[in-house]
Image (cartoon, helix red, strand yellow):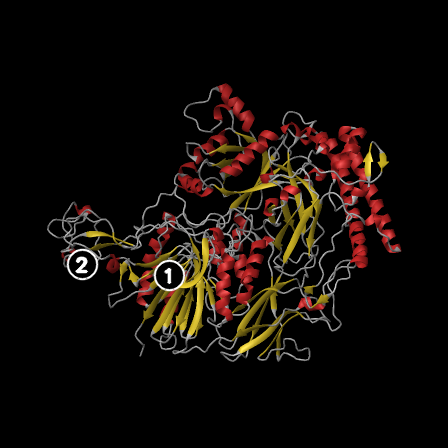
């Protein structure tokens, strides 16, 4: 327990528990001795036991065994030199782990002994849990006030050696805790503390990793850091572990986890234990959450002004007589009044989802790095509301009259008050009418700060932006928040959704929080999980790849392809042949590849040709990695020549360069590595947005052949968490496209991740919806979408999507007089003038929508801007000034006409004559022009459509002031210090990509807090009659 339990006076029941624990410990000792004797002789086995578990959890520190004799107890030694691994690693043949050389009989015996050892470990853990409960009953008289913990852990001053403790140990969702350690020796700057839930999780299945250098005193072997923990409704709670960096003897490698004892003591980045090896030093006691605590409360509009939807997450509420889940609400507050009763009560519906409901890895791989149980998602509608009136409410599991308590016998308990939320409040939606004044916030690309390097989130910025929005909400400045996609940036990790839910909860529990589908929430493709295993190994190592666009449908079923893995070698090392193999070379190659899965780099020849050659040499599968490029590039390069390799019948999987290197290293380091290729193609029908007909035709959703921008960005989520965690008005296609009537504005939410081309289901819905809007009731129309028609990203693949959206959607927006289009994806703020077909329409009667990109919620910012981002050419000067023309730059004719190069210089038809000069219209005005152009000097302000651009963090506030006036303000919450990338007119300075701009790692070091309105535009419209 606390490291000194054997010195404490005990009650009789505690003494009995000590005896039970000792019995379980000795049972485990016997099993470990048997395993050690089997491989290394009885003399070495006791040495193995001495170092096997230097952690607090087991309590073995009270017993030291050496050469079979008991010694007087003493403090454990640090694991700086893990002698216990020599018995395994020293006997390895060559570079291979010892398990590769066991006979079948020996492996069966190892497995049997491992089972006995696991049972002994289980008994030991149960005994330890009972002992901890008895200790806490005597030592920790906790007091409660509602759901707040009143006393932290009392630190033991008698314990010696390494110690890691967390306080408080009873916490609520998102609460900050303090992790403190001392007694560490031989520390390095690479040591770290891992956060795990539940406590029995594998060392590689961490929630977060924190380097000890976060504490200023780490060199002294002690330190203190602050962590924020989130309620995942696991009864065992959290555990923290301290790891010290070390090294294997003989520079050997081990397959994790070759042995359950070794595996629980190691952490190796990317599972490779050759260079970077970390040994578990000690662990903390568990940190406990109330499972039924209501978390992630969110409000949403239903489309009816007299209703408000409320959702929250908790464990399943207990059944009668406790009352189950409930929402209590009233127009009067009951806070602090025990005798007050809420006027109305409603019972919610609930939903949840499992790993089997998702579309692929990593989202459906169970563990902290993938799928975690989302709990019960409760959903209720509060009705009979009076628009504009404030209401007070509580949600959760209704308390039992006698104060029901959560927790197992002998463990810490939570008071009944933790089952219901504190009182919250909201203002009912306004009446839908012409002159109704309303304000709402709009932003995108939020995310939440975590300690993952792979997610493009600027440290601390999501929290700063949301703090600014919360201030607006608390001051009553806005009545709704609209998020245009890029919400949690979960990348397939359920835990990140939980953290993001806590981040926005203070906002979403006070005003309706409406959402828009984006690529990170939805886009999916069938992936292939590549799983490595080894005989007698306790754990497996897995990677995620993409199936090649040629070969079989892999396996459209769930049946995997399994075989021994090898690497390409010798004459066929690249699997690229420029000549003919000799008979001897062919025999050697077939001997190496027959019946195996081959790992090979992409090289210079086409991927399809490599797969075809591997098939001819007898391989049953190919894993290919690209040097210097991502999986996406390899996939689309192979797609161009896929038709040439229709004869390939073996599965070919593309993986990243890092994963490919790992796979090759595993094969080199270990004997008998088995690979399994399993496709997620059959899981794509889990997509919740598609009809049955669409699932039959294209279960992977929208993947047009003209763009490589629609990939597996959701990492296997395919919109399932987005569909389950939110509930938008039911007047379109679930949460994917729908409309909101809010005061005097209609907001049309569309999905740029689904087919929006002419004739598609969504296109027809958009057209019908815009046409049906009654402008005498809601004179203002706003469109919310994730990708933008008008942006300045340097990514050409994104620009291609804008080009096609301009062809399909922009005519609809123009025809039905959409006033404002809000979007995200591009992580900066950008606002246009009224624009249509790239032409600034500010001074034209025809007008056009204003486009605002508000991707400034916390994601890593874009700084460089492309000027020549669009596709339209216009006449400059002449009688056809500012009219579209079809000839390209440089084809201006001396007779003041615009010529078409496809007509060999012949003049255009009369309606295109007298153009003057035909050139591209760029974001900031006319592009390249010749001095001899008769158009003369031009004012970019009259031509370019960009009106404001900022690379900073913030949000947009839209205020409908009347039926004829709407204002858009962009509020900058944090100004980032960086070198300018555009000139005073917004034109790109073409800063080289090698020049770093923007914040480096922690933006707080290179910027300052703001809060000022840095861009304002007013939209006018004539009042409808």
Give the percent coordinates (x, y) of residue 397. Answer: 67, 68
- Distance from Cα at disc 1 to Cα at disc 2: 27 Å
Spot occupied by residue 307 in the image (x, y as percentages of width and height) = 52, 75
**Residue 891 screen position, x and y as percent:** 18, 47
Residue at the disc numbered 2: 881
**Residue ranking furthest to the left:** 895
- Per the image, label 2 sits on a secondary structure element best described as loop
Q: Nearer the viewer, mark 1 or mark 2?
A: 1
Pointers 1 and 2 in contact (CB under 8 A)? no
- For the C terminus, give its image quadrant: bottom left
Tag of residue 584? none
* Vertical comparison of 914 with 662: above or below: below
**Residue drawn at 75 percent across, 36 percent down:** 51
Q: Residue furthest right?
A: 12
**Res. 206 visible in picture:** yes
Quick one: label 1, few (<14), some, or many (20+) residues within 10 Å? many
Q: Earlier in the sequence, mark 1 or mark 2?
A: 1
Q: Which residue is mark 1?
A: 852
Q: Quadrant of residue 136?
A: bottom right
As drawn, is 106 to the left or to the right of 893? right
Quarter where residue 643 is shown: top left
């Amino acid at each position: 327990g606390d490291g000194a339990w054997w010195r404490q006076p005990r009650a009789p029941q505690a003494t009995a528990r000590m005896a039970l624990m000792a019995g379980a410990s000795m049972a485990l000792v016997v099993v470990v001795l048997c395993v050690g004797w089997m491989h290394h002789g009885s003399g070495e086995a006791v040495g193995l036991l001495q170092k096997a578990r230097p952690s607090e959890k087991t309590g073995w520190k009270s017993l030291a065994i050496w050469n079979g004799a008991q010694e007087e107890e003493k403090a454990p030694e640090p694991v700086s030199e893990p002698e216990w691994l020599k018995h395994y690693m020293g006997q390895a043949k060559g570079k291979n782990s010892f398990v590769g050389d066991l006979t079948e009989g020996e492996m069966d015996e190892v497995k049997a002994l491992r089972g006995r050892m696991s049972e002994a470990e289980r008994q030991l853990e149960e005994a330890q849990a009972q002992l901890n409960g008895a200790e806490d009953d005597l030592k920790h008289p906790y007091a409660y006030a509602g759901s707040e913990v009143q006393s932290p852990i009392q630190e033991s001053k008698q314990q010696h050696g390494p110690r890691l403790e967390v306080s408080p140990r009873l916490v609520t969702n998102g609460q900050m805790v303090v992790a403190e350690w001392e007694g560490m020796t031989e520390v390095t700057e690479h040591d770290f503390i891992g956060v795990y839930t539940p406590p029995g999780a594998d060392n590689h299945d961490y929630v977060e990793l924190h380097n000890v250098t976060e504490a200023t005193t780490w060199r002294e072997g002690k330190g203190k850091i602050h962590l924020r923990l989130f309620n995942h409704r696991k009864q065992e709670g959290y555990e923290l572990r301290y790891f010290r960096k070390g090294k294997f003897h003989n520079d050997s490698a081990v397959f994790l986890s070759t042995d359950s004892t070794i595996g629980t003591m190691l952490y190796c980045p990317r599972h490779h234990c050759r260079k970077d090896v970390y040994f578990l030093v000690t662990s903390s006691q568990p940190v406990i959450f109330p499972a039924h605590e209501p978390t992630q409360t969110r409000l949403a509009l239903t489309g009816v002004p007299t209703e408000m939807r409320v959702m929250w997450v908790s464990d399943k509420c207990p059944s009668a007589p406790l009352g189950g889940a409930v929402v209590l609400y009233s127009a009067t507050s009951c806070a602090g009044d025990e005798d007050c009763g809420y006027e109305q009560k409603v019972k919610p519906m609930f939903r949840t989802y499992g790993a089997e409901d998702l579309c692929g890895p990593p989202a459906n791989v169970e563990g902290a790095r993938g799928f975690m149980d989302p709990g019960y998602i409760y959903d209720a509608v509060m009705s009979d509301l009076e628009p504009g009136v404030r209401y007070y409410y509580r949600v959760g599991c209704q308390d039992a009259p006698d104060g029901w308590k959560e927790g197992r016998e002998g463990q810490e308990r939570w008071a009944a008050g933790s089952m219901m939320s504190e009182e919250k409040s909201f203002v009912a939606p306004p009446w839908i009418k012409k002159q109704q004044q309303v304000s709402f916030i709009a932003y995108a690309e939020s995310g939440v700060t975590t300690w993952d390097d792979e997610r493009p989130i600027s440290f601390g910025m999501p929290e700063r932006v949301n703090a600014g929005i919360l201030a607006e909400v608390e001051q009553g400045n806005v009545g709704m928040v609209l998020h245009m996609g890029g919400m949690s940036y979960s990348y397939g990790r359920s835990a990140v959704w939980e953290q993001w839910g806590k981040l926005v909860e203070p906002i979403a529990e006070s005003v309706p929080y409406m959402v828009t589908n984006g690529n990170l929430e939805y886009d999916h493709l069938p992936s292939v999980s590549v799983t490595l295993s080894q005989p007698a190994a306790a754990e497996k190592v897995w990677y995620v790849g993409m199936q090649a666009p040629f070969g079989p449908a892999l396996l459209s079923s769930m049946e995997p392809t399994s075989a021994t893995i090898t690497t390409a070698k010798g004459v066929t090392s690249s699997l690229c042949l420029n000549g003919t193999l000799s008979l001897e070379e062919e025999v050697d190659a077939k001997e190496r590849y027959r019946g195996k899965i081959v790992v090979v780099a992409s090289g210079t020849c086409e991927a399809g040709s490599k797969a075809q050659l591997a098939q001819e040499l007898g391989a049953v599968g190919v894993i290919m990695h690209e040097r210097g490029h991502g999986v996406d590039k390899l996939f689309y390069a192979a797609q161009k020549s896929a038709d040439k390799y229709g004869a390939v019948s073996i599965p070919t999987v593309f993986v990243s360069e890092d994963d490919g290197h790992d796979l090759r290293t595993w094969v080199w380091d270990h004997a008998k590595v088995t690979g399994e290729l399993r496709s997620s193609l059959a899981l794509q029908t889990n997509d919740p947005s598609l009809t049955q007909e669409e699932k039959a035709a294209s279960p992977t959703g929208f993947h047009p052949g003209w763009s490589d921008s629609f990939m597996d960005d959701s990492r296997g989520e395919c919109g399932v968490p987005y569909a389950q965690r939110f509930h938008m008005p039911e007047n379109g296609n679930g949460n994917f496209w729908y409309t909101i009537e809010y005061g005097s504005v209609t907001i049309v939410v569309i999905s740029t991740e689904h087919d929006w081309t002419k004739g598609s289901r969504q296109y027809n819905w958009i057209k019908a919806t815009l046409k049906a809007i009654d402008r005498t009731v809601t004179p203002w129309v706003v469109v919310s979408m994730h990708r933008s028609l008008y942006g300045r990203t340097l990514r050409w693949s994104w620009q291609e999507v804008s080009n096609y959206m301009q062809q399909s959607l922009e005519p609809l927006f123009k025809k039905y007089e959409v006033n404002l289009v809000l979007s995200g994806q591009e992580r900066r703020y950008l606002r246009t003038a009224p624009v249509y077909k790239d032409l600034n329409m500010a001074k034209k009667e025809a007008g056009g929508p204003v486009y605002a990109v508000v991707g400034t919620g916390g994601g890593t910012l874009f700084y460089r801007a492309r000027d020549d981002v669009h596709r339209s050419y216009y006449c400059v000067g002449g009688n056809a000034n500012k009219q579209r023309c079809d000839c390209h730059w440089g084809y201006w004719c001396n007779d003041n006409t615009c010529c078409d190069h496809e007509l060999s210089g012949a003049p255009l038809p009369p309606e295109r004559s007298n153009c003057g000069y035909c050139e591209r219209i760029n974001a900031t005005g006319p592009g390249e022009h010749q001095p001899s152009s008769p158009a003369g000097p031009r004012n970019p302000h009259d031509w370019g459509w960009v009106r404001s651009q900022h690379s900073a963090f913030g949000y947009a506030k839209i205020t409908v002031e009347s039926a004829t006036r709407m204002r858009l303000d962009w509020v900058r919450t944090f100004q980032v210090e960086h070198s300018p990338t555009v000139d005073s007119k917004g034109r790109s300075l073409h800063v080289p990509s090698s020049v770093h701009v923007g914040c480096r790692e922690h933006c707080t070091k290179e910027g300052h807090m703001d809060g000022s309105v840095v861009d304002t535009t007013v939209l006018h419209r004539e009042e409808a009659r």
